């Protein structure tokens, strides 16, 4: 009985569903018909829209052309307005000139003037002369006196400033000339002293020889370069660049000590200056150091044991353990 009741309900639901299907089928047909009509209508409207867009483009082009014509017409109107303003200004100036020159208005002058009917008359020439005369008369500037006083005051101030600048320039030039002359004198004096010291030290280091410092441009010592000429014993005079490495080092040291003698300092640091010296040249350098070490305190950085023998104090560093540096000092007693 339960199954029969379910079957009956199912049949009733089936009949109801079939009715709904029939109704939806009918609606679907109506919707398809309506869709076809709407699509047809849409096509007509798109076609109409396309034609309207074309007409709009034509109208926009016409509007653009009309605006361009309007812009040109406005420019022409502005030009004509400018010309009109110029003519009106000329007319006002002419009326003022007539009143100032002949004490008459322009209308009165027109009535008095009789036009010449002769075709050969020089009307244009007369008009040109009249314009030239008119240009000579300008409007009266009531502020001219005040402007003149202000400009004159400014001119007097600038003239005074100009004179002060001229005096300052002349004073500066005189000071520069005096400084240049003093610098030239001091430079020549220093060059002579350094040249003498250079020759003396060179003779000590090389046991003779000739060395000098000369200017590349003797007429202009303040702008000139300096050349070092060295002639060790038994060699020809030659430029410093043509010497051997040891000779260059000794010559450089001789020049350095020549400068040092001229302007001595309480301290002097030499960093491995003996590295390029051979045995003989090293001995000469150490003999020089023994002679002058009483005058100045020298600090020499070296790895050469012979150079260390000349020192009064020796400071050394060692790294017995990684990243730990120890400093040792030794005082060397005088040899009896």
Image (spheres, rainbow, N blue to C red):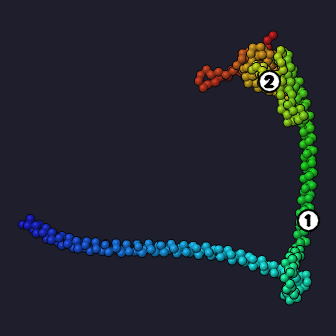
Query: Which quadrant would residue 33 be assigned to in this image?
Result: bottom left
SS under mark 2 = helix
Q: Is residue 333 visible?
A: no
Residue 104 percent across, percent down from the top left: 89, 86
Q: Nearer the viewer, residue 114 or 258?
A: 114
In the rendered structure, the answer to whether residue 201 lies left or right of residue 72 reads right
Q: Is residue 164 above or below residue 309?
A: below
Residue 290 percent across, percent down from the top left: 81, 17
* Marks 1/2: CA–CA distance: 68 Å
Q: Is residue 121 visible?
A: yes
Label at residue 152 = 1
Q: Residue at x 25, y 71 (%)?
A: 28
Residue 263 percent across, percent down from the top left: 85, 29
For the C terminus, the image quarter is top right
Q: Nearer the viewer, residue 99 or 184?
A: 99
SS under mark 1 = helix
Circle 1/circle 2 CB separation < 8 Å: no
Q: Residue at x 93, y 55 (%)?
A: 163
Residue 161 percent across, percent down from the top left: 90, 56
Label at residue 240 = 2
């Amino acid at each position: 009985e339960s199954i029969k009741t379910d079957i009956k309900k199912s049949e009733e639901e089936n009949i109801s569903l079939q009715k709904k299907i029939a109704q939806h089928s009918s609606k679907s047909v109506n919707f398809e018909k309506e869709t076809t009509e709407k699509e047809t209508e849409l096509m007509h409207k798109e076609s109409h829209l396309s034609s309207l867009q074309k007409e709009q483009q034509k109208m926009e082009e016409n509007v653009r052309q009309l605006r361009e014509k309007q812009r040109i017409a406005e420019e022409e109107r502005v030009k004509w307005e400018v010309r009109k303003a110029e003519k009106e200004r000329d007319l006002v100036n002419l009326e003022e000139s007539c009143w100032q020159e002949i004490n008459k208005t322009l209308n009165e002058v027109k009535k008095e003037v009789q036009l010449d009917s002769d075709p050969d008359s020089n009307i244009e020439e007369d008009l040109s002369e009249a314009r030239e005369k008119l240009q000579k008369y300008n409007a009266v500037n009531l502020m001219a006196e005040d402007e003149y006083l202000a400009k004159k005051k400014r001119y007097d101030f600038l003239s005074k400033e100009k004179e002060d600048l001229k005096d300052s320039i002349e004073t500066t030039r005189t000071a520069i000339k005096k400084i240049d002359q003093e610098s030239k004198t001091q430079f020549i004096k220093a060059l002579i002293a350094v040249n003498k010291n250079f020759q003396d030290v060179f003779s000590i280091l090389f046991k003779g020889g000739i060395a000098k410092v000369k200017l590349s441009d003797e007429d202009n010592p303040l702008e000139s370069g300096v050349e070092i000429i060295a002639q060790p014993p038994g060699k020809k005079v030659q430029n410093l660049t043509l010497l051997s490495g040891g000779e260059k080092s000794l010559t450089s040291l001789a020049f350095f000590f020549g400068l040092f003698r001229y302007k001595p300092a309480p301290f002097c640091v030499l960093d491995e200056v003996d590295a390029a010296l051979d045995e003989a040249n090293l001995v000469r350098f150490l003999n020089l150091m023994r002679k002058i070490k009483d005058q100045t305190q020298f600090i020499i950085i070296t790895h050469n044991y012979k150079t260390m023998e000349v020192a009064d104090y020796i400071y050394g560093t060692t790294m017995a353990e990684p990243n730990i540096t120890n400093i040792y000092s030794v005082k060397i007693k005088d040899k009896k």
